[in-house]
Image: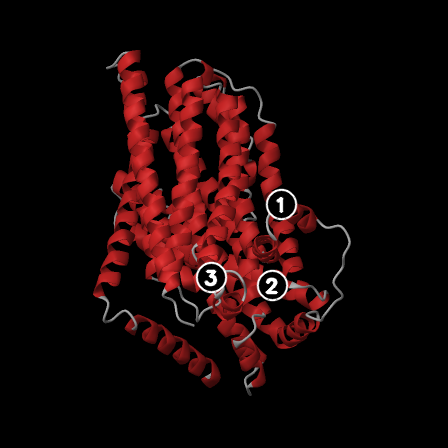
């Protein structure tokens, strides 16, 4: 126990030193605090409007909210389970700190417990951050007492621990049994987590014909997803306990609370018992699998992909091949791309089943613009997460680039062109697929492609440019690089840009198709004005970050 307390005290000291770094920079603290608070308030008002809309549905509003809570906790359970599997491998077997701890006279049970607490934190923070405005909005709409928040905390704590324990147990057993490399662990975790995803996809595509009667439609749709109310799932225990509290049946609610805590404690005890016998063999197995192997010249998808850039000069082709291979060799990067854009693609493909979009042009317009905005927000998040650290990750090898025939300016432009081409192709494919399924007008089709082009240019230039303006060459952890001041500014500017662009183009379409305030001639003029403003904003968001980044790199001393 004394060893565990020392490690915990060391972790708190590291956190304190990290906070002290921002002590003299109150501007950074204020910016981060202001935009974090703005995000929470924005999500709160968004959820509140959603709950208010649902409560206007006659007769079945309570039933809809009830089923939405079951869906929410079930979906959260699977996402946190997948996140726990990804986080467990990188935390349990990461090089550096883990190697040092294993070499010290500390029991493996203490090391395992210390690492598991990190996994639980990394797995749960996003759910807690989004859960605060969601449950607060629900409590405000229904005028719930303060005890509601206390019950939520009591229910969520064992729920988070259960998902983290299941992910850690899966990773520990798999690493012990099989000498797998990191990417194979991620593949195995992805396959396990894909089972419920494929189940939901099957249910969505096998939905029966939707009747016109609202009550019958809701009953058929909800009965098609009975898995969310399976009595053996922890997500069901949390939702059921919450609804029992709202109904005043505290006795039955306590049964589900005891069920959550008992299973959480039982699984934690099992993990502690197994860690003494499995953690070090699994650690040795993973380290032993990192052996050298002969480079194969056989056909591979990466070689096929990089062959498309054979027209480039040799030095640029080598740089492009390096960036592509680094991206696909890190499962934490391409797996998140697959999750975000995969879910969006499934949603877009499923639009074909909603025939009522063919009735009114206003629905087509709204759904098309909302989809473009969603793709913009996702693109802003992913470019900040993966494109912003690219120049910083060259830190320990940047002296090699300085000795080569490449300049840092050329490296910057290569990263910009490569990421822009990738982002534009993916987002344009999804956007055009949306417009084809919705059968939008040629004008909206053209406007959608212009918006996608502008967003890809601006968000890519912001991430690559600001990543060079605010580099951190001392760190090789992308998450740590993004969490700094530059990454925060980049994310905020990207969100503001998407909101501004979508708002500008929405004004003429809303005036024409929803409010019916203008005719076709005035509508075309307003669309041209909006496109002009968007083009101007895009030019400035592309020109200034890249220009300032080039100047910063020219003055860089290594």
> Residue 524 location in percent, x, y?
31, 17
Q: Earlier in the sequence, mark 3 or mark 2?
A: 2
Q: Earlier in the sequence, mark 3 or mark 1?
A: 1
Kindly indicate whether the residue at mark 1 contacts the one at mark 3 (C-beta within 8 angstroms). no
231 or 131, which is in the foreground?
131
Snapshot quadrant of residue 23: bottom left
Secondary structure of residue under mark 2: helix
Kindly indicate whether the residue at mark 1 contacts the one at mark 2 (C-beta within 8 angstroms). no
Which residue is label 2 attached to? 169
Q: CA distance from mark 3 to mark 2?
A: 26 Å
Residue at (51% x, 62% y) in the render: 264
Which residue is label 3 attached to? 478
Secondary structure of residue under mark 1: loop
- Other-residue count near label 3 (Cα within 10 Å), few / some / many at <14 / 14–19 / ≥20: some
Q: Nearer the viewer, mark 3 or mark 1?
A: 1
Q: CA distance from mark 3 to mark 1?
A: 31 Å
> Residue 456 location in percent, x, y?
43, 40
Q: Nearer the viewer, mark 2 or mark 1?
A: 1
Which residue is label 1 attached to? 311
- Other-residue count near label 1 (Cα within 10 Å), few / some / many at <14 / 14–19 / ≥20: few
Q: Earlier in the sequence, mark 2 or mark 1?
A: 2
Residue at (54% x, 84% y) in the render: 106
């Amino acid at each position: 126990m004394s060893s565990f307390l020392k490690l915990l005290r060391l972790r708190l000291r590291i956190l304190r030193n990290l906070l002290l770094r921002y002590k003299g920079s109150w501007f950074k603290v204020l910016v981060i605090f202001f935009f974090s608070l703005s995000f929470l308030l924005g999500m709160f008002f968004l959820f509140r409007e959603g709950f208010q809309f649902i409560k206007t549905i006659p007769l079945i509003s309570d039933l809809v909210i009830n089923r939405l809570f079951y869906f929410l906790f079930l979906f959260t359970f699977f996402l946190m389970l997948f996140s726990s599997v990804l986080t467990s491998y990188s935390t349990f077997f990461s090089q550096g700190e883990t190697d040092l701890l294993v070499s010290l006279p500390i029991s493996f049970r203490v090391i395992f417990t210390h690492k598991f607490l990190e996994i639980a934190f990394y797995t749960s923070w996003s759910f807690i951050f989004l859960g605060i405005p969601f449950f607060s909005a629900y409590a405000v709409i229904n005028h719930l007492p303060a005890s509601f928040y206390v019950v939520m905390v009591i229910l969520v704590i064992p729920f988070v621990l259960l998902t983290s324990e299941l992910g850690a147990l899966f990773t520990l057993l798999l690493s012990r049994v099989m000498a797998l490399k990191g990417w194979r662990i991620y593949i195995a975790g992805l396959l396990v987590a894909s089972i419920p995803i494929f189940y939901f996809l099957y249910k969505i595509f096998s939905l029966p014909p939707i009747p016109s009667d609202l009550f019958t439609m809701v009953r058929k749709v909800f009965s098609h997803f009975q898995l969310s109310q399976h009595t053996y799932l922890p997500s069901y225990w949390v939702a059921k306990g919450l609804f029992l509290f709202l109904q005043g049946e505290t006795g039955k609610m306590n049964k589900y609370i005891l069920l959550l805590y008992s299973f959480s404690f039982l699984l934690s005890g099992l993990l502690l018992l197994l860690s003494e016998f499995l953690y070090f063999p699994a650690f040795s197995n993973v380290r032993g699998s990192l052996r050298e192997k002969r480079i194969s010249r056989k056909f591979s998808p990466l070689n096929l992909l990089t062959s498309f850039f054979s027209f480039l000069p040799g030095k640029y082709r080598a740089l492009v091949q390096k960036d592509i291979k680094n991206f696909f060799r890190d499962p934490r990067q391409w797996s998140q791309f697959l999750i975000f854009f995969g879910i969006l693609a499934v949603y877009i493909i499923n639009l074909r089943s909603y025939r009522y979009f063919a009735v009114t042009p206003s629905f087509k317009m709204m759904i098309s613009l909302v989809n473009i905005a969603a793709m913009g927000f996702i693109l802003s998040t992913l470019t900040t997460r993966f494109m912003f650290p690219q120049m910083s990750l060259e830190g320990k090898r940047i002296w090699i680039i300085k000795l080569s025939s490449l300049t840092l300016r050329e490296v910057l432009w290569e990263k910009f062109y490569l990421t822009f081409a990738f982002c534009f192709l993916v987002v344009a494919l999804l956007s055009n697929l949306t417009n084809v399924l919705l059968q939008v007008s040629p004008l909206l089709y053209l406007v959608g492609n212009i918006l996608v082009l502008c967003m890809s240019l601006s968000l890519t230039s912001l991430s690559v440019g600001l990543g060079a303006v605010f580099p951190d060459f001392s760190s090789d952890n992308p998450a740590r690089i993004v969490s700094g001041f530059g990454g925060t500014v980049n994310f905020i500017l990207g969100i503001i840009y998407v909101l501004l662009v979508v708002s500008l183009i929405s004004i003429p379409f809303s005036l024409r198709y929803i409010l019916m305030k203008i005719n076709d001639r005035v509508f075309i003029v307003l669309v041209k004005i909006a496109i002009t403003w968007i083009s101007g904003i895009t030019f400035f968001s592309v020109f200034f970050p890249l220009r300032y980044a080039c100047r910063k790199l020219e003055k860089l001393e290594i």
